[in-house]
Amino acid sequence: MNKIADKHVLLLVDDDPENIEIVNSILGDKYEIRVAKNGVKALELANTEPTPGLILLDVIMPHMDGYEACKHLKADAKTRDIPVIFLTGKTDVVDETRGFEVGAVDYIHKPFSPPIVTARVRTHLMLRDAHETVARQLATMNSELEMARQVQLSILPREIPDLPSLEIVARYLPMSSVAGDFYDFLVVDDKHLGILIADVSGHGLPSALIASMLQSALAWQCPHASDPEEVLSGLNRSINGKFERYFVTAAYLFVDMEKGTLKYAGAAHPPLLLWQAKLGRASEYVENGLMLGPFTNATYTSLSFTMQHGDRVVLFTDGLVEAKNSSGKEFGVDRVRQILESKHDLRRVDSSMRCSMGFRTGRSTRLGRASQMTSRFSSLISRLRHN
């Protein structure tokens, strides 16, 4: 192994041969030292590969002093992160403050004390190494999050089913780049449709991958599309025992437009809201079994009810109702019900819910931005329309 290549590179900038000799005698055995005798040469060597891990910069030099050289270093994207330690005989607070203002991390005063020089150089190199390690880890995490985001987007339906007697609006607003919410459809024919909305616990790549698995499992439930109990049981079997720390809440709705009926079942999921045009009010329906995943023998039951022309159904994940404004007040199911009862156009219902997410604070309507909300949501709204 090349021992020189393993050493940190230091750039020493000083026009005094005596200072150069002293610093070399203190640090030369531990580090590879480059020497520049003026600011212009320092800028050139700072950009030479391998770039230095630290710069020891004299304050007083001809043509370009240390302050000016440091400004140039911090203005260059390639050198701005290299720590700079000023070498100076000045101890005035004003002078030191100026050095920190232009980007220095520390001072070493003349005459040099070998233990002080050694300790401060070692400390700032360790901090630089730690910073680079964190930066690499962050880059890896961001890469994984981008992968998870691509997985997430790939499992969302590219198109909403366009059926003659049913209008559907879907809205997906994640708190962060990756969440565990998703929805999908089982289209039996132009009169029969299954709708699944689900929420995987947690965030990031694991949640996205579990959602992807659940989507694949849903496709296998086509033979049972008209039976919400069996669909949820089948999904539970498909992921049971595969994950220790994750679970899924879900709701499944089967729409039979031929008979004008709905069958609904849930797995620890928020309620379904049904607005009935004839009555002019919204009702809340909950028929929940255990969450999907953790329990082997989980069973589910369903509710059946009729749906008339003009009725509306809203399915959503908990991020909608658990979102909090800056005062800590939750959005709540009642607010969703009020919006549903006050609006008569499907897209106005969707738009009103999105606008209400900021609780009229004037901030972004994306959950998790305005008031440190810890959830995210998907919503599905459907309306039986006249043939």
Image: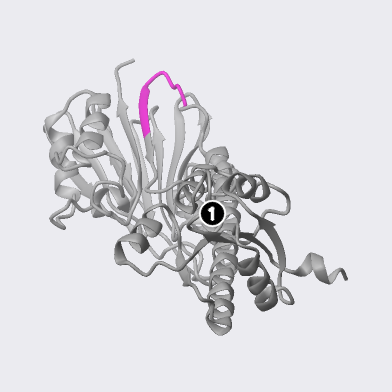
Q: Residues within 10 Å of mark 1 (few under 14, many from 20)?
A: some
- Name the residue at the top extreme: 387
Q: Which quadrant would residue 4 be assigned to in this image?
A: bottom right
Q: Name the residue carrying label 1.
A: 81
Q: Which quadrant would residue 128 be assigned to in this image?
A: bottom right
| Quadrant location of the N terminus in the rendered image | bottom right
Residue drawn at x 80%, y 65% as measured from the top left: 5
| Quadrant location of the C terminus in the rendered image | top left
Q: Is residue 261 above or below residue 211?
A: above
> In the image, is 43 to the left or to the right of 176?
right
Residue 349 % position (x, y) = 22, 30
- Relative depth, front residue between 112 and 279: 112
Q: Is residue 257 magenta?
A: no
Q: Is residue 164 magenta?
A: yes
- Residue 301 visible, this angle: no
- Relative depth, front residue between 127 and 241: 127
Q: Secondary structure at mark 1?
A: loop
Q: Which segment is the magenta one?
A: 161-170
- Name the residue at the right extreme: 1
- Relative depth, front residue between 316 and 71: 71
Q: Give, as a three-letter code, the residue at label 1.
A: Asp
- Residue 60 visible, this angle: yes
Residue 214 % position (x, y) = 55, 51
- Name the residue at the bottom extreme: 115
Residue 337 % position (x, y) = 16, 42
Residue drawn at x 39%, y 45% as measured from the top left: 174
Residue 334 % position (x, y) = 14, 48
- Relative depth, front residue between 339 and 255: 339
Q: Is residue 10 above or below residue 50?
A: below
> In the image, is 338 to the left or to the right of 175?
left
How many numbered discs, if any? 1
